[in-house]
Image (cartoon, helix red, strand yellow):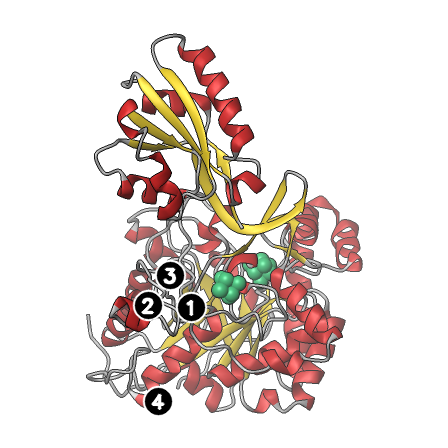
């Protein structure tokens, strides 16, 4: 594989800094060493997104590593956003993976706490949580800006161009704290944020307004999280079973009114409308589409939401 | 206090079955308070084992004031030769110290040491501290993020917090929700406005504490 120049920056960063409305999607690694499956998913996304998030043992279920899946993306010419959760690694493993990934071309990282191991396929596992997501972001920033390991030693060729991301959930209680927590992430050194799936636009606008008023959106790029609803069942599940998710009743009404056959289509329509609105909102720098196991429909969605063509940067 | 739960009878039986004469050693401090290994529990275990094992093994019982203190462990020195094995009902620290003081004697634990916690009500105990060595309770409104947050987050709450409950369980309050609420009521939210830096995990190696003023006595410095 062609390793990129050590000085080359993150593509997502270039897109954002040049003022384009960014578009990222998500790719879940397979539950095995199935390279063909990864390549297939990559082929759906390549050319249609600026970068793709590679999830890290999402929902605490073991999958092909996010590091190696990210490298497969680079090999295929798709820019990865390398996700790293705090559940499975201590600070030694995290830093060595960051350096290894950087050496092979990874330029964008997303720092997450991770779902608790209780939800996954190894509920007996010992969760690591040596650091939390903010401490992880602060560590990556120190590696990048000071050229130092978390422990203080100098790094021989630091990851100087790495672009640091984190998640934010505008909907989890206490609501009042949410914007301050965003401010904390900015203080920790986060460059961009991808939000939790947004369904309650009103609450999102409120959160965004506060972030704008506090000057946070001048310091951090916010990518709004969008997940198309596929059915009434999925919407209800998100509403009741997924912690920290806010699905308003009128969206469910819309899906119901569309009828069983057309519910998925209505879900896509809603997502496209949301994306259109996001483009107009002050403080939103792009959208992050989490179309879970729907990678093949991303191009169509991107087209309909007016996100194509993607800029050359 | 240290809270424990008694091991299942079958597990205890399997450990001591090779021996003829076993002394059950209770502890009169934490495990007595949490009803796992005090005088009463020694008596109950002795009866259960005698019934279950018939005359294959004979049991006596004794309860020391503390098994984490040599002074009390030495009270067994006169009787130690009468037994093939000890079955300790103390916490893991007590079991180890008993074993250290009588190194020639096999010692078995009858209790699973569970946590450092509080007494919510009779027979009801809750974990509160993991002995991390760098207490942050002063910042976090007296609620331990290491113990009470399922992910031991120092800068929570995570995105999974669910109407005041933790993502892992609808019954479990979210530690960081509670921290926020308490600090807000006390007008001290500024305490958590800055990022709490990575913890210095001191509970990753065996530690020794020598209190100030005692260094000379032991000719050493505290670690
Ligand atoms: S912060 Fe550490 S020492 Fe303080 S209560 Fe929590 S685990 Fe115990
Ligand atoms: S929901 Fe609250 S207690 Fe549970 S892991 Fe997240 S921050 Fe910690």
Residue assigned mark 1: A131
Whichever of labels 4 and 2 marks the residue nearer the N terminus, that label is: 2
Dot 3 corresponds to which residue? B203
Which one is closest to the eye, mark 4 or mark 3? Answer: 3
The alpha-carbon separation of the residues under discs 2 and 3 comes to 20 Å
Visible residue check, residue A299: no
Labels 2 and 1 within one chain = yes
- Residue in view at x 68 percent, y 52 percent: A235
Of A221 and A84, the residue lying toward us: A84
Disc 1, SS: loop
Badge 1 residue CB within 8 Å of ligand 2: no
Observer-nearest of A173 and A313: A173
Gap in Å between the C-alphas at discs 4 and 1? 19 Å
Residue B1 point in image, percent of width and height: 54, 50
User: What chain does badge 3 belong to?
Assistant: B
Q: Residue at x 44, y 71 (%)?
A: A110
**Horizontal arrangement in the rendering, residue A213 relative to residue B79 (left or right):** right
Quadrant housing residue B11: top left
The answer to whether mark 2 and mark 1 are in CB contact below 8 A is yes
Residue at figure coordinates x 42%, y 54% from the top left: A127
- Asked whether the residues under the numbered discs 4 and 3 touch, taking CB atoms below 8 Å apart as contact, a structural biologist would say no
**For residue B214, above or below residue A228:** below
């Amino acid at each position: 594989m062609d390793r990129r120049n050590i000085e080359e920056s993150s593509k997502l960063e270039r897109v954002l800094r040049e003022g384009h409305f960014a578009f990222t999607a998500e790719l879940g690694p397979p539950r095995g060493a199935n390279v063909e499956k990864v390549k297939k998913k990559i082929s759906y996304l390549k050319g249609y997104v600026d970068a793709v998030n590679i999830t890290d043992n999402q929902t605490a279920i073991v999958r092909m590593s996010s590091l190696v899946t990210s490298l497969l993306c680079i090999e295929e010419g798709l820019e990865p956003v390398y996700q790293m959760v705090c559940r499975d690694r201590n600070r030694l493993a995290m830093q060595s993976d960051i350096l290894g990934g950087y050496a092979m071309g990874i330029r964008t990282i997303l720092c997450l706490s991770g779902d608790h191991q209780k939800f996954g396929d190894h509920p007996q596992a010992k969760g690591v949580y040596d650091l939390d997501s903010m401490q992880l972001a602060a560590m990556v920033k120190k590696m990048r800006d000071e050229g130092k390991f978390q422990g203080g030693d100098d790094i021989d060729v630091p990851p100087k161009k790495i672009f640091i991301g984190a998640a934010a959930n505008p909907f989890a209680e206490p609501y009042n704290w949410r914007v301050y927590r965003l401010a904390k992430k900015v203080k920790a050194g986060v460059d961009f944020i991808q939000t939790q799936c947004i369904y309650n636009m009103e609450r999102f606008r409120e959160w965004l307004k506060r972030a704008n008023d506090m000057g946070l959106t001048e310091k951090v790029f916010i990518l709004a999280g969008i997940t198309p609803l596929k059915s009434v069942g999925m919407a209800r599940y998100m509403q009741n079973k997924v912690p920290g998710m806010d699905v308003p009743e009128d969206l469910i009404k819309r899906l119901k009114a569309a009828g069983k056959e057309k519910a998925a289509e209505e879900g896509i329509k809603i997502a496209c409308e949301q994306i259109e609105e996001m483009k107009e909102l002050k403080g939103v720098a792009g959208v992050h589409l989490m179309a879970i196991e729907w990678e093949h429909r991303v191009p169509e969605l991107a087209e309909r939401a007016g996100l194509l063509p993607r800029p050359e940067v | 206090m240290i809270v424990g739960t008694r091991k299942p009878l079958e597990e205890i039986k399997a450990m001591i079955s090779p021996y003829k004469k076993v002394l059950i050693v209770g502890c009169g401090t934490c495990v007595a308070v949490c009803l796992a290994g005090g005088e009463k529990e020694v008596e109950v275990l002795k009866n259960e084992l005698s019934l279950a094992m018939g005359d294959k093994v004979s049991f006596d019982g004794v309860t020391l004031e503390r098994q984490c203190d040599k002074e009390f462990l030495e009270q067994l020195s006169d009787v130690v030769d009468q037994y093939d094995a000890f079955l300790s009902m103390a916490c893991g620290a007590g079991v180890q110290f008993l074993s250290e003081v009588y190194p020639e004697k096999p010692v078995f634990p009858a209790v699973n040491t569970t946590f450092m916690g509080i007494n919510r009500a009779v027979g009801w105990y809750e974990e509160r501290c993991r002995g991390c060595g760098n207490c942050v309770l002063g910042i976090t409104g007296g609620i331990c993020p290491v113990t009470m947050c399922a992910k031991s987050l120092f800068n929570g709450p995570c995105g999974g917090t669910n109407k005041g409950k933790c993502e892992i369980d609808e019954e479990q309050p979210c530690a960081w929700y509670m921290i926020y609420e308490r600090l807000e009521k006390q007008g001290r939210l500024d305490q958590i406005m800055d990022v709490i830096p990575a913890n210095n995990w001191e509970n990753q190696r065996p530690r020794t504490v020598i209190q100030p003023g005692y260094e000379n006595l032991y000719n050493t410095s505290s670690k």
